[in-house]
Image (tube, helix red, strand yellow):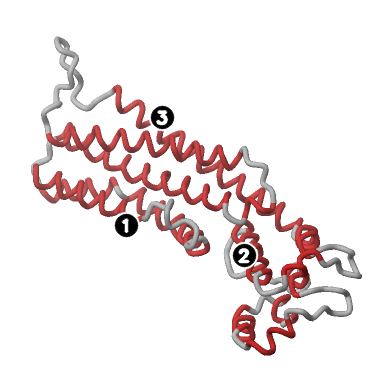
Amino acid sequence: MHVAIKNRQKEIFNMVKKMEIPMTRLVRRIDKNGYTLLHHVAVMHYYSGGTLPGPALQLQEELHWFDRVRKIIPPHYEMHRSRYKDKTAQEFFKKTHTKLLKEAQEWLKRTSESCSTVAVLIATVAFAAAYTVPGGSNQDTGLPVLLHDPIFLVFTVMDVLSLASSLTSVVMFLSILTSPFQLQDFRHSLPQKLILGFSFLFFSVAVMMLTFTATILLIVHLKKRWTTLLIYTVAFLPVSIFALLQVPLYLTFMNTLKSSVNLIRIPINSVLSLVRATLSSICKRR
């Protein structure tokens, strides 16, 4: 069991865990260095980088592995100090994962800074679009000329959603950048904030493209169906590229946190459903 834990062999760990009689003995064993099973989680000599991409995900995986092993050992073993290092398992884990923690901090900072920059740009565009409505305004009443056009409602709603979601994304990324980046923050707090920030960012990009599409349709008033479909395709090209590049990372985060973020995550299916419903509404009204 000690060998399986320090080599991160989860399948072997799960098999032995089901054997009640060996487990009662193995969980209480302490090796010649005074290491309990929990101490072996912190051993990095056999660590090969984990199964997930990115230092932050790898650190989170290590923290979850530590929690899994802690559940099977006697509670008082958490305070046991090894003879070799004279440290508890928690202290030993923190010391051996210092390098990985530093890499995770730098990676998360770079990611948050890049995403927050994109979110601010989207918010700027959405805010400017609210004051430069397509078709202009009536000089006598000050109301938009195309106010009663059904597509103008789509433009307004999408612009508001884009602005709100991008600003929310900025807030989440700023929350990450101002956090202390402690080891325990990578267990749930920081990954959850990153998921929320990335979700709102992806949503803001999608609805911003819908805003752009609605603007083109309001100004040009296309009659040919194939031309309209061409505009839809071009408008959603950036969203598709963004999704192909970033969604795999997002899904990886969701898989690692599926037990703790079910109440806060924004499924991509909701965004796609909104896009389909909006496009269907536009086509019917045209």
- The crowd level at tag 2 (other Cα within 10 Å; few <14, some 14-19, many 20+) is some
- Left or right: 65 with respect to 25? left
Q: Point out the residue furthest to the top here.
A: 140
18 vs 238: above or below: below
Residues 42 and 206: in front is 42
Number of the front mark, 1 or 2: 2
Among the 4 quarters of the image, the one containing residue 65: bottom right
- Left or right: 212 with respect to 14? left
230 vs 148: above or below: below
**Residue at horizontal 64%, vertical 87%?**
20
- The residue pinned by badge 1 equals 269
Residue 73: x and y in percent read: 71, 73
The residues bearing labels 1 and 2 have C-alpha atoms spaced at a distance of 28 Å
* SS label for mark 3: helix
Residue 47: x and y in percent read: 71, 71
* SS label for mark 1: helix
Work out which quarter of the rendered image holds the C terminus and state it: top left
- The crowd level at tag 3 (other Cα within 10 Å; few <14, some 14-19, many 20+) is some
* Amino acid at dot 3: Thr
